[in-house]
Image (cartoon, grey):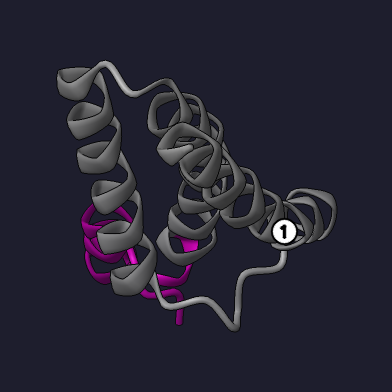
């Protein structure tokens, strides 16, 4: 009975995450997502996976493998969307050391 409850919980929480993951993967838009929150969420899902593995609890393992894969994709997209917005050290150096045309 406890495994049935765990399986239902795992299926529901994993499925609830899928529409957000599909939307971000399709649109590549992550403006409304906090990088810090998603990094913590992904780390938490990884910890749940380790916990599930240590218990040998298949509902926890399967749900967190799927969620970790989706969360990692979203986190990667978020990180890539943030990186170009920050000036690179090399670009800043090149811009400041270039000769000025008169």
- In the foreground, 82 or 23: 23
Q: Residue at x 42, y 78 (%)?
A: 34
Q: Residue at x 20, y 41 (%)?
A: 47
- In the foreground, 5 or 19: 5
Is 52 situated left or right of 84 in this image?
left
Q: Position of residue 55 (x, y in %)?
A: 19, 23
Location of the C terminus by quadrant is bottom left
Q: Position of residue 26 (x, y in %)?
A: 84, 51
Alpha-carbon neighbours of circle 1 within 10 Å: few (<14), some, or many (≥20)?
A: many
Q: Position of residue 78 (x, y in %)?
A: 51, 59
Q: Quadrant of residue 24?
A: bottom right
> Disc 1 marks which residue?
24
Confirm whether the magenta stretch covers residue 12.
Answer: no
Vertical side of 61 occupied by 85: above or below: below
Q: Position of residue 33 (x, y in %)?
A: 52, 76
Is 8 situated left or right of 98 in this image?
right
- In the foreground, 9 or 31: 9
Mark 1, secondary structure of its residue? helix
Q: How many marks?
A: 1
Q: Quadrant of residue 60?
A: top left
Q: Residue at x 26, y 41 (%)?
A: 48
Give the magenta range. Answer: 84-102
Is 21 situated left or right of 64 in this image?
right
Vertical side of 2 occupied by 21: above or below: below
- In the foreground, 51 or 19: 51
Confirm whether the magenta stretch covers residue 95.
Answer: yes
């Amino acid at each position: 009975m406890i495994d049935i409850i765990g399986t239902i919980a795992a299926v529901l929480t994993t499925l609830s995450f899928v529409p957000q993951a599909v939307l971000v993967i399709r649109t590549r838009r992550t403006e409304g997502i906090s990088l810090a929150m998603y990094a913590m969420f992904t780390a938490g899902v990884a910890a749940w996976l380790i916990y599930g593995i240590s218990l040998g609890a298949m509902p926890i393992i399967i749900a967190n493998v799927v969620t970790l894969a989706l969360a990692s994709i979203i986190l990667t997209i978020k990180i890539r969307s943030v990186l170009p917005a920050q000036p690179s050290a090399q670009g800043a150096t090149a811009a400041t050391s270039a000769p000025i045309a008169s």
